[in-house]
């Protein structure tokens, strides 16, 4: 469905929206519905629609949208990127997630890694259509912990216990051992993982590093795709490491103060991105409901003539519009800071974008399903899939509760500051390494 | 024309380059803060200083250290290095002008017999002071001085050399932990334009 965008897009932006929308409607959405209905294991077989669509996205160079031109990418403007993610999310939040996590290891190297890592890992990823990245953060014993550790009191962070994946330095290599959670998006199909690991001697999760691990290395194992309620078009699964050796330059972010900033800022990026495709899902659900309500006749009149339906449609429209305006602004602010290399986006604003958009997606999908009546529960209609996906979004990339608590800490500490205040994170993450450095010296 | 790195000439050249750059002045207009650089001597340093020209460069830098500061090297790995080079710290403390009379060829030769384990931890300390678009001061300092600097950057000589030659960028080195940075990283990130311009200018000086 066409719609009026208050932002008054330029001709280029309109063309981009049309192109991505057409792809989302004609390719992504049908494949996502097919995948949603397939048994978990079937979805990761070589002839699965998952691979077909991923390959097509790569041929369209969608994976390059954040990579600077001089590094071989497309680097859309932040506003174009917003349009891109909303449209892709409209088609499928599962594929939007798959593309998002695919970008993480390689985009992080592009911005922060060494030339050598860029040449070995990013250059082939830019060219090939069969390399797929994933993002290994959460662990069997640590889900929300990974998020809350950023600003939680240090004594509590210590109580969280050790990470399930640890990294140990051995000469010019790092050895990775341990298990990531069963929820790592695209892990069952991934070739590379952007991995968070705790340093072996480190006291807490916060004393960690970010590295990129090719998943064909000796000692890596990947789980079968899990059979989930929602986001079934992006297979989730575990990934484990048994003394996997990686060269030093694959450790992109070393333990220390920058690791804290990195985790905080990466979450800003994923937050606005998940926010954008949540708006896409909300819009998709709203449009389904509007279309259906115009056609379905009950009580002698189309549903749209009934006041309760009219009010619901208005409320849904209002939520989508407000979410778009806010998430787009937050994405513009956040992405522009990545592009400038300042990496000083505002955590509270980025989290708010994600939290608000996810809630809107869930509420709108919920109301859309209600407007459909029993048809809404039937597999023939997409609205039940949107509802299940929206329900999953409330947990993916951080539960809305934990994201809110974490954003609240930033608000309480920094509300009045007109800049990203990384002082406490820097200080605290510095302390972790200083302790180890002192021990090493002794 | 290229200058020897490291040397006093190189320091002067950098100071001049930064202070005559309009773009730097603009992007660093609000920057307030100094850096203490610790350049740890490594295998590459031991090799480089076997070249008399580089040894002369090093001595030219050390000579800028005010006489009353030399005592701070007492009991430190740098003192061992001086000893190995046949320089007596006590003599320098009494009269730093002995450095004017050293034979750099002789020192460079002696460098060849020094093993890293013998002087591990020895470093060259440099202090850079930046304020509102101006590179106010660039000085060699003694160990323990300027510890209150807003930023402290520590790393091996070979890394600094690569930065100066423009072969690697500072930020990825900091992020990957090869260069250790102590200080308000958030402030540095916010002022990345100044950091980047400085690095560009630094790398634009041809060095020997
Ligand atoms: C579709 C999907 C995709 C995902 N993709 C990835 C991925 O690509 N990579 C990856 O690493 N992970 C991924 N995850 C995992 C996801 O990040 C976690 O599920 C999420 O962070 C929550 O962790 P958990 O499931 O362990 O729940 P828990 O952390 O166990 O939380 C359980 C409940 O307790 C609450 N809670 C937890 N801690 C606190 C606290 N300190 N204070 C107050 N309340 C708290 C939570 O809000 C929640 O309601 C994905 C999850 C889903 C559903």
Image (cartoon, coloured by chain):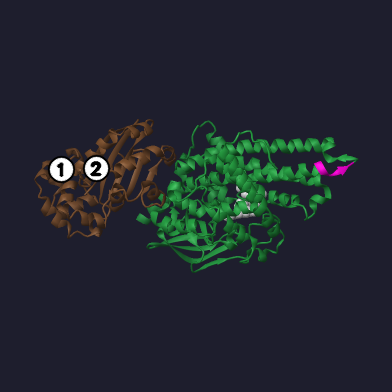
Mark 2 chain: B
| In the foreground, A41 or A393 | A41
Q: Is residue A291 left or right of residue B194?
A: right
Q: Which chain corresponds to the colour green?
A: A
Q: Is residue A15 above or below residue A142?
A: above
Q: Residue at x 17, y 43 (%)?
A: B60
Subunit under mark 1: B
Q: Quadrant of residue B152?
A: top left
Rendering coords of residue A243 (x, y %): 48, 66
State which region is magenta.
A294-298
| Any part of residue A174 in sight | yes
Q: Which residue matches tag 1?
A: B93
Work out whether residue A149 or residue B32 is closer to the camera in this orientation and state it.
B32
Q: Residue at x 15, y 43 (%)?
A: B93
- Color used for chain B? brown
User: Which mark sits nearer the N-terminus, 2 or 1?
Assistant: 1
Measured as percent of width and height from the top left, residue B102 is found at 10, 48
Image marks 2 and 1: residues in contact by CB distance under 8 Å: no
Please tell me whether residue A53 belongs to the stretch shown in magenta: no
- In the rendered image, the quadrant that contains the N terminus of chain A is top right
- Residue on which disc 2 sits: B142
Q: Alpha carbon of mark 2 to alpha carbon of mark 1: how far?
A: 12 Å
The answer to whether residue A402 is seen in the rendering is no
A75 relative position to B200: left or right: right
Task: Say few, some or many: other residues with alpha carbon within 10 Å of mark 2 (under 14 / 14 to 19 / 20 or more).
Answer: many
């Amino acid at each position: 469905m066409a719609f009026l965008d208050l932002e008054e897009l330029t001709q280029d932006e309109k063309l981009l929206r049309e192109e991505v929308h057409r792809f989302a409607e004609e390719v992504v959405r049908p494949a996502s519905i097919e995948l949603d209905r397939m048994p978990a294991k079937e979805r990761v077989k070589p002839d699965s629609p998952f691979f077909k669509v991923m390959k097509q996205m790569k041929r369209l160079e969608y994976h390059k949208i954040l990579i600077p031109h001089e590094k071989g990418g497309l680097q859309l403007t932040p506003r174009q990127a917003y349009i891109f993610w909303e449209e892709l999310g409209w088609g499928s939040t599962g594929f939007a997630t798959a593309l998002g996590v695919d970008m993480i290891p390689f985009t992080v190297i592009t911005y922060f890694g060494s030339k050598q890592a860029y040449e070995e890992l990013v250059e082939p990823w830019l060219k090939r259509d069969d390399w797929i990245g994933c993002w290994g953060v959460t662990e069997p014993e640590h889900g929300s912990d990974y998020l809350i550790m950023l600003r939680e009191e240090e004594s509590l962070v210590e109580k969280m216990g050790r990470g399930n994946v640890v990294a140990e330095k051995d000469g010019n290599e790092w050895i990775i051992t341990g298990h990531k959670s069963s929820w790592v998006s695209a892990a069952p199909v991934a070739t590379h993982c952007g991995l968070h690991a705790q340093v072996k001697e480190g006291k807490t999760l916060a004393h960690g590093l970010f590295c990129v691990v090719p998943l064909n290395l000796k000692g890596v194992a990947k789980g079968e795709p899990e059979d989930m309620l929602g986001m079934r078009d992006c297979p989730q699964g575990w990934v484990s490491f048994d003394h996997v050796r990686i060269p030093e330059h694959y450790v992109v972010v070393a333990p220390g103060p920058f690791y804290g900033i990195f985790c905080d800022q990466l979450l800003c990026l994923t937050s606005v991105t998940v926010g954008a495709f949540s708006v896409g899902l909300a819009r998709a659900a709203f449009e389904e409901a509007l279309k259906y309500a115009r056609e379905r006749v009950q009580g002698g009149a189309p549903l749209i003539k009934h006041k309760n339906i009219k009010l619901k449609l208005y409320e849904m429209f209002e939520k989508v519009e407000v979410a778009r305006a806010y998430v787009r602004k937050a994405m513009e602010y956040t992405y522009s800071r990545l592009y400038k290399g300042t990496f000083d986006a505002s955590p509270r604003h980025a989290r708010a974008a994600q939290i608000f958009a996810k809630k809107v997606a869930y509420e709108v999908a919920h109301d859309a399903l209600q407007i459909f009546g029993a048809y809404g529960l039937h597999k023939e209609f997409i609205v039940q899939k949107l509802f299940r996906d929206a329900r999953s979004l409330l947990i993916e990339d951080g539960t809305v509760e934990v994201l809110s608590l974490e954003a609240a800490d930033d608000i309480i500490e920094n509300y009045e500051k007109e800049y990203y205040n990384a002082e406490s994170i820097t200080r605290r993450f510095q302390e972790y390494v200083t302790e180890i450095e002192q021990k090493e010296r002794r | 024309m290229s200058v020897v790195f490291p040397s006093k000439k190189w320091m002067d050249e950098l100071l001049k380059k930064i202070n005559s750059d309009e773009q730097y002045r603009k992007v660093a207009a609000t920057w307030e803060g100094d850096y203490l650089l610790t350049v740890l001597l490594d295998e590459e340093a031991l090799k480089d200083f076997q070249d008399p020209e580089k040894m002369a460069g090093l001595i030219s830098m050390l000579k800028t250290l005010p006489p009353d500061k030399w005592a701070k090297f007492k009991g430190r790995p740098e003192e061992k290095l001086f000893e190995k080079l046949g320089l007596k710290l006590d003599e320098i403390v009494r009269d730093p002008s002995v450095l004017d009379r050293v034979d750099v060829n002789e020192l460079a030769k002696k460098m060849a017999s020094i093993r890293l384990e013998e002087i591990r931890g020895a470093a060259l300390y440099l202090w850079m002071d930046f304020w509102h678009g101006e590179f106010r001061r660039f000085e060699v300092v003694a160990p323990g001085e300027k510890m209150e600097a807003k930023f402290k950057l520590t790393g091996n000589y070979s890394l600094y050399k690569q930065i100066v030659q423009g072969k690697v960028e500072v930020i990825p080195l900091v992020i990957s932990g090869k260069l250790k940075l102590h200080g308000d990283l958030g402030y540095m990130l916010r002022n990345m334009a100044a950091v980047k311009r400085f690095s560009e200018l630094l790398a634009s000086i041809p060095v020997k």
